[in-house]
Image (cartoon, helix red, strand yellow):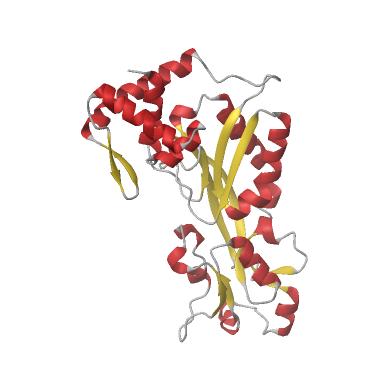
Amino acid sequence: MDWDNLRFFLEVARTGTLTAAARRLGVDHTTVARRLRALEKQAGATLFIREADGHRLTEAGRALLPGVQAMEQSARQLAPAQPDAAGGPSGVVRLGVTEGFGTVMLAPQLARLTMQHPSLTLDLLALPRMVHLSRREADIVISLERPQRDSVVVTRLTDYALHLYGEREYLARRPLVRSREDLRHHAFISYVDDLLFTRELQFLGALHQPARQPAHFSLRSTSITAQVEAVRAGAGLAVLPAFLADHDPTLRRVLPTEGRFIRTFWMSMPSELRHESAMQAVWTLVREAVAGMQARLLPP
């Protein structure tokens, strides 16, 4: 069988959609469809069933997959990724990460990496939702939950601190907060419950559980940057990452001891990509950059 057709088959099997496979391969989705038809004609069997949310392997497709994966691994060992003219990594790496961490902490570091290696392109998905490695939405994912799949390389990237914050003028004109009980006098800013992508971002229940009436939310948003702006505007209190809020002179910690939370970022990538030079470069850069950010990620 034609290897070119087989690699198209492999990307569709991994990503589940023609569009995602086309992005990975740098072609149009119609090219992917044409290659699959050619391969199915060679194989004399249907390899995918088209469903509403993508393409699912048939029994014949599942039987073919292990052999194609082995061929890919052999090809990588014989012909590793070519470096750019300066001897560095090249290609496209897509990094999925939570919105605040990706935008504020990682974007400047990643920009420097691309300046050092002009042949390297980075797609930064800094989103207020989970980016799925299993769907190949990204090549490297930084998440708040440790991936449980055996087919990925995982490292504990870093812990980071969050605190309860309020805007200084807001706090000056509202009842003083000396204890958790005093929080009943305040409005809160938080995530939209039914759109919360991980339980690791549930804080208020551990901090404030009023006996008589539920907490009042002045604003809820899927975006952490929107929450920061709402707190700055004086709309209420919110649990925010210290790396976002501590450097804002308009914000102040509330209940510094009781209002502190620690969460963990995990970094993962598919095991079959771990030897690619571009993947190794981004992986190493992120680990080294985060190691130098500890004072901001875990302030006292």
Q: Residue 35 in the image: state x and y as whole percent.
A: 38, 28
Q: Quadrant of the C terminus?
A: bottom right
- Horizontal side of 278 relative to 49 (left or right) equals right
Q: Residue at x 62, y 20 (%)?
A: 83
At 74% across and 74% down in the image, what residue appears?
168
Res 126 visible: yes
Q: Is residue 133 left or right of residue 220?
A: left
Above or below, comparing residue 29 to residue 41 in the picture: below
Residue at image location 62% in from the left, 63% down from the top: 240
Q: Residue furthest right?
A: 249
Seen as rendered, the residue at the extreme top is 78
- The reply, left or right, for residue 153 in relation to residue 43 is right
Please, is residue 169 above or below residue 143 in the view?
below
Q: Nearer the viewer, residue 234 or 12?
A: 12
- Quadrant of the rendering where the N terminus is positioned: top left
Q: Is residue 230 above or below residue 36?
A: below
Q: Residue 280, position in %: x, y? A: 57, 28
The quadrant in which residue 63 appears is top left
x and y percentages locating residue 234 in the rendered image:
69, 76
